[in-house]
């Protein structure tokens, strides 16, 4: 007589590691101010994944006992301390690529980890903000950038960095911030765009290249940084046809499978949206601005996993 199996045994669960950082855990002594964004994101993703037979398991990326081979795939999640130890982070991702399936793919992550990828996208026709590249952020390189850009107000960002880490706004004639508040190595320098304070930035979220939702990121009054860590907040934005087409055109400049992509855009001095960056490593997915984000993400993840298994 055939055995009777319950629903749990009928559905073989696929294990996915969701990489995060210890500083994203609210009880950790060094918890970031925006730790709650991890809580919101995992709360949106886990139930939707479970409904499709996917177990999304949070894992600290640099935990000594993390074993990538125990998982069917590894998703880079809220690893928001990686820029402080980039070599260890990349070594772990290489191990994940060898022992499991890394999402997004390793070559894509390597390329996206340094903001010099923006040069490639500019060459492929993506709308860009004028940028000066320098090997170090000091008085000479910043003064030269003022002249090259024809600007008296600039933003200096590290080539390897995220979340406004060691980023600075500098006005011509003002003293430079302390060295530990400037990029530690190679940097990019761009004109400050007033739209960031007046209008905010736009974050277009795509899963497996399908559009999910868009968030408008607004800085705190008197600031230009849109991250919640600095008092920024977000609103739902319903993009117009032209706005969405522009974001898609940036995404189309990149080949290969992409579990997620966040295209961040800002209005330039010409009144047109331009690319700030495209996040392919560990973007915050703005679940509050995407009510259907969980199911859309889970479907994209399952499609990619089924594609690789076929």
Image (cartoon, rainbow, N blue to C red):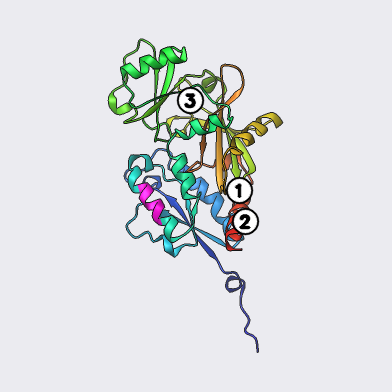
Circles 1 and 3 in contact, beta carbons < 8 Å: no
Residue 220 circle label: 3
Residue 303 circle label: 2
Residue at 32% from the left image edge and 57% from the top image edge: 64
Q: Which of marks 3 and 2 is nearer the N terminus?
A: 3
Residue at 51% from the left image edge and 46% from the top image edge: 40
Magenta part of the chain: 89-95
The quadrant of the image that shows the N terminus is: bottom right
Residue 173 location, x and y as percent?
Answer: 35, 10
Q: Which of marks 1 and 3 is nearer the N terminus?
A: 1
Circles 1 and 2 in contact, beta carbons < 8 Å: yes
Task: Label 3, secondary structure: give it.
Answer: loop
The Cα atoms of the two marked residues, 1 and 2, are separated by 8 Å
Residue 111 location, x and y as percent?
Answer: 46, 41
The Cα atoms of the two marked residues, 1 and 3, are separated by 32 Å
Answer few, some or many: residues within 10 Å of disc 3's Cα (few below 14, many 20 plus, some between 14 and 19): some
Q: Nearer the viewer, mark 1 or mark 3?
A: 1
Residue at 56% from the left image edge and 20% from the top image edge: 268
Q: Name the residue under label 1.
A: 208
Residue in the foreground of this view, choosing between 46 and 251: 251
């Amino acid at each position: 007589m055939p055995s009777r199996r319950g629903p749990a045994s009928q559905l073989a669960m696929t294990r996915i590691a969701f990489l995060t950082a210890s500083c994203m855990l609210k009880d950790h002594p060094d918890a970031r101010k925006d730790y709650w964004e991890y809580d919101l994101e995992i709360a949106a993703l886990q139930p939707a994944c479970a409904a499709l037979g996917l177990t999304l398991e949070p894992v600290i990326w640099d935990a000594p006992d993390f074993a990538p081979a125990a998982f069917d795939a590894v998703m880079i999640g809220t690893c928001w301390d990686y820029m402080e130890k980039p070599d260890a982070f990349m070594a772990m991702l290489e191990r994940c690529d060898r022992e499991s399936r890394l999402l997004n793919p390793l070559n894509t992550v390597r390329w996206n980890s340094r903001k010099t990828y923006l040069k490639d996208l500019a060459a492929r026709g993506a709308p860009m903000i004028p940028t000066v590249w320098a090997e170090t952020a000091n008085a000479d390189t910043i003064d030269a950038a003022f002249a090259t850009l024809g600007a008296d107000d600039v933003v200096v960002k590290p080539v390897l960095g995220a979340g406004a880490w060691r980023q600075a706004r500098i006005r011509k004639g003002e003293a430079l911030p302390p060295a530990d508040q400037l990029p530690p190595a190679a940097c990019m320098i761009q004109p400050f765009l007033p739209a960031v304070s007046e209008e905010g930035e736009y974050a277009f979220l795509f899963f497996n290249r399908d559009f999910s939702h868009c968030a408008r990121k607004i800085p705190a009054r008197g600031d230009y940084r849109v991250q919640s860590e600095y008092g920024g907040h977000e609103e739902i934005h319903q993009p117009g046809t032209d706005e969405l087409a522009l974001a898609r055109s940036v995404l189309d400049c990149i080949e290969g499978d992409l579990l997620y992509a966040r295209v961040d855009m800002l209005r330039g001095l010409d009144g047109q949206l331009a690319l700030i960056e495209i996040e392919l490593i560990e973007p915050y997915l703005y679940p509050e601005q995407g009510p259907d984000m969980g199911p859309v993400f889970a479907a994209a993840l399952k499609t990619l996993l089924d594609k690789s298994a076929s």
